[in-house]
Amino acid sequence: MADVLKDKIKLRLARVAVIGLGYVGLPLAVQKAKIGFDVLGIDQNPKRVDLVNQGKSYINDVAEEVLQEVICANKLQATESFHQLGECDIVIICVPTPLTPTRDPDISYIERVTLEVSKYLHRGQLVTLESTTYPGTTEEVVLPLLERSGLEVGKDYFLAYSPERVDPGNKRYNTQNTSKIVGGVTSLCLEVACTFYAQTIQQVVPVSSPSVAEMTKIFENTYRAVNIALVNELMFLCDRMGIDVWEVVEAAATKPFGIQTFYPGPGVGGHCIPVDPFYLTWKARQYDFSTRFIELAGQINIQATYYVVEKVRKVLNLMEKSVNGARILVLGVTYKKDVPDIRESPALKIMKLLQEERAELRYHDPYIPEVELPGTGILRSVPLEADQLAWADCVVIITDHTIIDYQFVVDHARIVVDTRNATRQVTLNRDRIVKI
């Protein structure tokens, strides 16, 4: 069965199903369709399905003309139904893995989708999981659900874990030129999965098991979270000492060895860094092990968000104003610059905290026309105009979108709290800038 499937893959005769058409799934589906695979995209969001079938991209990293090309060539179609899975040779699971309110892993999406896959599982099929999750998920959760089909893994069908490595907005690295980790349940599972991914990815890196691949993904994002926490804690200290932390970090970055540059900020956001370390700490507790260093990093990054609110409070106090009744304009609400994604964005937490202190809040973000804050309803982005800047007692830069003219912002604002060093090129009226 492995040889038959590998031949179908190499000849582009294998039909591919991608479950979950978000930031990971849609670029993957388009990439496979571009080289000749027939791809079925499955998503439970009807709006996404309609947009894909109309050739309209909602993901920045997927060019609309490329999406239209594969749609018109009948190489990609989207649906809300799982019924066609029985006709597919390869099934890739790219569903969300959020945290519960108590910061425990929520793998319910993986479980529900795997149950659907098990209904249509057949001999000669490859199933891969790409969703970020704790080590052991593939073999302890996915495999038992697929075994309900009565088929034997590594003989009748093949199962592997291959974590996504998507970096939204990255112009240099994309799905094709970012190396791909693959761990198979058996040696044949690994062989088949590597054959599939090698069709579109320049470097495929096989590892000994799905657990190794799962741990690799968690480690990559925990590494970033810990180093961001280090520089955030340095920010707290530099603030007390009257030292510019941005100057320190940029000076250290000139060392040609032994250091990788991380920058402080208002907290961490996105679909990985605020979430993945907690998957690891949760799993570690099952082994009577406490990941103290990692948990401390998470606490520091959360503290950074509250630190921004405190900085705004101090700035207003110097202006003889309180947060209560103050008019605050937030610039940028996405978790990362130039990316239309607000998942886990620290901006939302900061805005909510300021509103709880009865600040009058407005925001501007060229990528997000409106946001909904819990308990306060919908806010709509205001235009970045002189009168909006003059309206505010304090302007807070939370996300440093490159499209924004920061000299214009500083020229028309009373005071600017800059959490990203976005104003580093501003030359006039720098006395109005307060950096964290």
Image: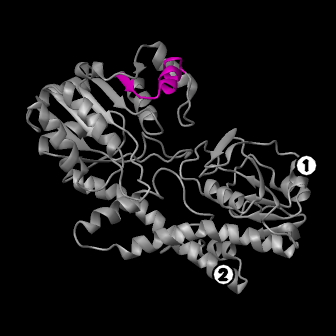
Q: Residue 24 shows which numbered tag?
A: none
When the figure is inspected, residue 322 is found, relative to residue 145, above or below; the finding is below
Near-viewer residue (119 or 411) = 119
Please name the residue that numbered disc 2 is placed on.
238
Q: Which mark is residue 386?
A: 1
Residue 95 falls within the magenta-colored stretch: no
Specify the segment rendered in magenta. Answer: 38-55
Quarter of the image for the N terminus: give it. Answer: top left
In the drawing, does residue 180 fall left or right of residue 313? left
**Coordinates of residue 166 in the picture (x, y in percent):** 45, 45
Looking at the rendering, in which quadrant would you find the C terminus? bottom right
Residue 215 in picture, x, y percent from top left: 30, 58
Q: CA distance from mark 2 to mark 1?
A: 33 Å
SS at badge 1: helix
Residue type (three-letter) at the residue carrying disc 1: Ala
Identify the residue shown where x is 12% and y is 26%. 123
Measuring from the top left, give residue 424's x and y in whole percent.
76, 64
Side (left or right) of 420 relative to 146: right
Write down the quadrant of residue 8 in the picture.
top left
